Amino acid sequence: MPDPRVFIIRHGETEWSLNGRHTGITELPLTANGEKRVRATGKALIGDDRLIVPGNLAHIYVSPRHRAQRTLELLNLGCRDRYPWHDSPSKSPDLLDIRTSAKIEVCPSIREWDYGDYEGLTSPQIRQSRKERGMDTDWDIWRDGCEGGEMPEDVTRRLDELIKEIRERWHEGHFGKDAGWKGKEGVPNDVLIVAHGHILRSFAARWIGRPLQDNPSLILEAGGVGTLSYEHHSVKEPAILLGGAFVVDVAEKEEGK
């Protein structure tokens, strides 16, 4: 059985993500291509024999921004819990393909960085603006933060609190024989986070205790999926999972013959 995991998913493509514009509080829809690719991701990676097993999800955290919430909808996880941003379910629960009982929580801690004065600007535009105002043009968000917005230590603080919650609430004591598997033999223990590019790269860095100021050289494309877990079956040894084997029920049955 795999150790507990955290799956981080960046929202699908928007017009600003295509153009490299920093998008924090601005509400933008996904592009048609963005929606198409997220649906494809759901079909490819979600299922009992896929990377993300819906029945083994203990909890789902989603950003307050609409683009992240729409991404979660398009993944088609088969959530029993209704989407909190809808007044009522679009269908009766008995008509849905229910595959997970994980609760969905709109979580402010995983909102995108507050870009402040840099909202809507590209990195070259930010550096040009700083140059025109006589400021250092060697700007790095991981080190310098954003004028009128958040600094790395602000982001670190809110993410560390969430990471502590995930480990204490969903992962502590859920290793080895106590690990969940599809919610059938044990308690589900995987966590899903749907949010944004910079905040998820920050989350991955903080997951392994790396200072944001060191500039985590991590990439997560629009609609991309990352996996975080642990080494040596220990909650005290968090790790980034570069590649893991899918847990295939069919394979286990074959071995048991």
Image: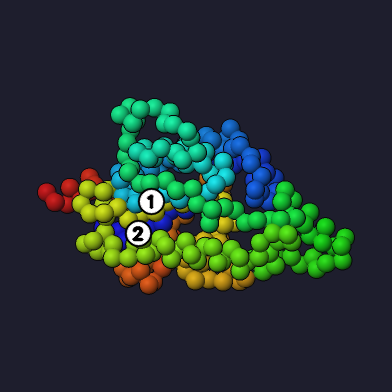
Secondary-structure class at tag 1:
strand
- Asked whether the viewer can see residue 244, the reply is no
Residue 133: quarter of image: bottom right
> Amino acid type of disc 2?
Trp
The structure residue drawn at horizontal position 32% and vertical position 56%, both measured from the top left corner, is 189
Camera-nearest residue between 125 and 108: 108
Farthest-out residue, left: 257
Residues at discs 1 and 2 in contact (Cβ within 8 Å): yes
Please tell me whether residue 242 is drawn above or below residue 27 in the rendered image: below
Disc on res. 103: none
**x and y, in percent, of residue 178 in the image:** 23, 61
**x and y, in percent, of residue 116 in the image:** 71, 56
The structure residue drawn at horizontal position 20% and vertical position 52%, both measured from the top left corner, is 185
For disc 1, the marked residue is 59
Q: Distance between the residues labelled 1 and 2?
A: 8 Å
For disc 2, the marked residue is 170
Q: Is residue 143 left or right of residue 137?
A: left
The structure residue drawn at horizontal position 53% and vertical position 57%, both measured from the top left corner, is 109
